[in-house]
Amino acid sequence: MKNFLRLPIVAVFVFIMTTAFSQECTVYFPLDEGTEVEMTNYDKKGKVESTYTQKIEKKEVDGDNLDITILQKIYDDKGEFLHEGRFGMRCEDGNFYVDMRSFLDEEMMSAYEGMELQVDSKDMAIPSDLSVGMSLPDANISIAISNQGFKIMTLTVDITERKVEAQEDITTPSGTFNCYKMTYHISTKMGVRISGNATEWLAKDVGIVKSENYNKKGKLQSYTLLTGLKK
């Protein structure tokens, strides 16, 4: 069975930035349109599996609300373009939220293009006052896929046990960064349930610097490094 979860979280909120916003919300992403980050995914032996870029395509401010649209492009291990997709982030009630759809593999989900997708999600919240020892809210997404009125399958992703573990210096090809070390448990279900754990290192003004993915037995399966940042 193919895993529809795109790890690491990233995939998902890759530039952490502590820019103060109205309603005392810290925006965990740069605000300049056109800013782009490159992340490289490796298998457990250090072989490149794929890369992806995430670029700020649009920023919208409406009073106390902020919405950011991210364009994500995915490439194979040889740098050949595979697929692109978009997801959102927003600032609301003192928290920064990441659209849970950013955790889905866009290339695999494209197989269901044109079908009916019923999405129910609780987006990932990142509070403004991150600190070591803090426990963070759970996040999840459920997608019911139907074709011509007939339900084909349901995909669910649950992220739980999120915690800020420490602050550490991490070195990648893009430099050395002081990071928050965060851990969480992740579970996906599409007929069969697959679960594991992940660790991510987040740097202010940069975002996801490094992540590691483990199976339920605690064995490293893959990791991701920040390999490029264009402002």
Image: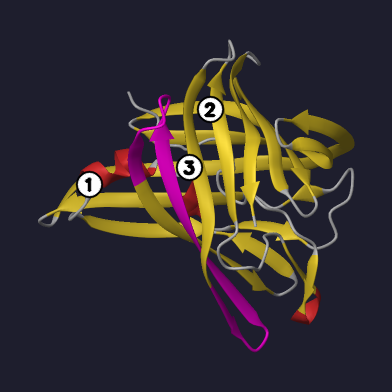
Q: Looking at the rendering, in which quadrant would you find the C terminus?
A: bottom right
Q: Which residues are magenta?
A: 59-83
Looking at the rendered structure, the secondary structure element under dot 2 is strand
Query: Would you name the residue on which mark 1 appears?
Result: 112
Which labelled disc corresponds to residue 85? none
Precedes in sequence: disc 2 or disc 3: 3
**Residue 171: horizontal and vertical position, in percent?**
79, 30
Please state which of residues 15 and 198 is positioned toward the viewer in this rendering: 15
Taking the spot 46% from the left edge, 59% from the top edge, the residue there is 87
**Residue 225: horizontal and vertical position, in percent?**
65, 32
Which labelled disc corresponds to residue 157? 3
Is 113 on the left-hand or right-hand side of 119? left
Q: Amino acid at mark 2?
A: Ser
Instruction: Give neighbour class at mark 3: few <14, some 14-19, many 20+ (Cα, 10 Å).
Output: many
Residue 17 is covered by the magenta coloring: no
Q: How many marks?
A: 3
Query: Would you name the residue on which mark 2 appears?
Result: 195
